[in-house]
Amino acid sequence: MFYIGSAYYPELWEKEEIVKDVQRMKELGLNCVRIGEFAWSTMEKTEGVYDFEIFKYVMDTMYENGIYTVLCTPSCTPPRWVFKKYPDLMRVRYNNYDNIRVEIHSRAHACKSHEGIRELNYKIAEEMSLALGKHPGLIGWQIDNELYPYDFGCFCERCTKKFREYLKEKYEDIENLNKKWQMKRWSLNYTSFDEIMPPAPMSWEHPSHAVEWWRFQCQLINTYAWEQADAIRKHSDAPIGTDMMIDNALSYNNINKKLDVVQHNHYDSENELYRTFLNYDFYRTLKDSPFWVTETQPGYNGSYAAYNGYRSNGHNYINSLAPIVQGGEMNLYWHFRCHPAGHEIGHGAIYSSAGVPSPIAPSIKKIADTLDTCGDFLENTKVKSKIALTYSSTSVKNFMFAPIIPHLDDHDHSFRPLLADRFHDAFRHYNVDVIETDKCLDEYEVIVAPLLSCFDDCDFGTRVKKWVENGGTLIAGPYSDIMTDYATKHTKRTYPILEELAGVKVKHHLPVEQDNFKAKWTQGGEIFDIFLGCDAFDCVDSECLATYTGFDFEGMCAIAKRKVGKGNVILLGTAPSKDALLKLVDKKPILEASKNVFLTKRQGKENGIVALEIENKDGYIMLEGEYYDILNKKNVSGKVEIKPYEALFLKEI
């Protein structure tokens, strides 16, 4: 079953309004809501006195009307009595070396290391599970809301103490930390772990220091979520997840190891629709179960005002189908009805606070109808890939604080767009899995590993070498194997694992990009664009596939290839154009198609292809054989035109 729905906040509405909203949901074909994420003061007005009546009423009413519920724990917004009980609970924000405790103003106020809030989180999660966890309309749980180290985390004395304990456990001896972080530079050596303070955000901090602080804050978040999941599981067996932001700086892989379903929130603009496919190809690989999109905008998003432009009906149609086509089973909007007050008064919804439908509403009914028509085909098929692209949270963290190249110098907002734009976007006509470094590699024939800063993360270097020896093709670089997991460069070689594996030595390293930098194939001499700077190689035991042209690296090797066992290693000294990257991948696309069409091959009890037009343009696909067009109820073959923002679900005949 597939779910289309929205977030809903029954604590804001009278029951007669809730009844109206349920009817509106039915008319649009919605079959899922998620509730409760900010409602702690409604559920527990005073400590130990729980009241879930309004939520049970909503779940009952929804279920009677064919609408299922995802229930959320409210730990993102503890009520004021919690902070009166624990005055030291408020998160401490860094403020120009004069740390200040935040005030109750919006959400995510609590320090994640405070034992008091963890106990209260556990209690209310357990009480929710006891009261509602067996409800027939309950299909899942969401922990908290968009957990993340906001403002670079909490800087209280308790977090500082725990950070020192974390470092001592990892490095054991302060001299070991000094050595690994190279603290003799600028005479920054510590004499004791007790001297270490949290790094100052937006200051010229040591990258290793900042990386470890971020990793420590992420570990706090992981256990913060897992404890609530433990409480829920006492009385409910519905799957549990936590809705996460788009970037992998808080590791999706790590936090979801002890959860059941990957949940994702995104608000990409209309012209960035293609980037969301990177995320879906990633989430599909993290769990055996389908992922959920728990938030996306219905038309426009914002806070005090509407920001980021309007997303059309056509965009909403494709944006909502895409996660399900790519291996998910749910797409929920934020939110069903605009809040009449508060911090997000300017955010769009399916209905206004006054009950006026959004112009986007027609596309939602169309989405529900499409899934009704194509649901059996999607249920009977899966996305299977022979090509993988790495997306390492360790790399995201490293480049956040030691970006090396200017393209990554935007804290946690650079890596995903760069990976999407320069690498993943080349595969619009291919099935590709996006994987973390601990993923089993056996099912793949080609692995593309750019920007994989720490190549031995999760023993990836050793495992990928064996995989290559058994017949795989590894395309690595640029900037892969350039750092340790604590963001220091290597001292013996620029890329110690990859230089040996690829049979090269780095002759020059230039992390600078200019428009006149080009490369050309050694066979044929065709010139292609390159990006993200240049490494020039001496081919010691390898073949040069492409050389630089038009600047100081003229004639030097840009791309090298080496036979390793039954397979091949291709080392990139630069980021090649998309067409050049596909030439190296050397795999046939699903079909020939125009570049504005995203293709997904699905296999199983049935076989077929889904084509999504993602740029609001006319396009085409060239079919090889005859297919049945499920939506248009006709057989098709040869060249098939596809309209702007059209979806084609094609089943092999």
Image (cartoon, rainbow, N blue to C red):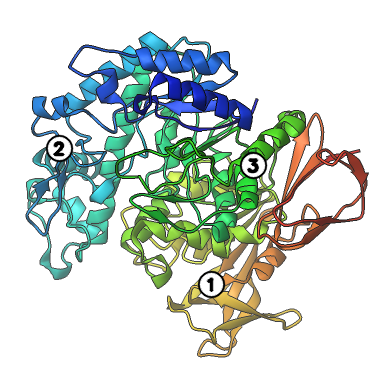
Residue closer to the observer: 441 or 79: 79
Tally of numbered tags: 3
Q: Which element carries disc 2, helix, strand or loop? A: loop
- Alpha carbon distance from label 1 to label 3: 49 Å
| Tag 1: amino acid | Gly
Asked whether residue 234 is in view, the answer is no
**Residue contact between numbered discs 2 and 1, judged by CB atoms under 8 Å:** no
Q: Which mark is residue 362?
A: 3
Q: Residues within 10 Å of mark 2 (few under 14, many from 20)?
A: many
Q: Position of residue 248 (x, y in %)?
A: 43, 48
Left/right placement of residue 354 relative to residue 628 reads left
Q: Which residue is under mark 1?
A: 573
Left/right placement of residue 481 relative to residue 520 reads left
Q: Position of residue 353 (x, y in %)?
A: 42, 38
Q: Please say if 20 is above or below 400.
A: above
Q: Please say if 471 is above or below 482.
A: above
Q: Which element carries disc 1, helix, strand or loop? A: loop
Q: Residue at x 37, y 39 (%)?
A: 146
Q: Please say if 206 is above or below 67.
A: below
> Residue 283 sits in which quadrant?
top right
The numbered mark, 1 or 3, whose residue comes first in the sequence reads 3
| Tag 3: amino acid | Pro
Q: Which residue is under mark 2?
A: 90
Asked whether residue 228 is in view, the answer is yes
Q: Residue at x 28, y 21 (%)?
A: 42
Residue closer to the observer: 193 or 511: 511
- Alpha carbon distance from label 2 to label 1: 47 Å
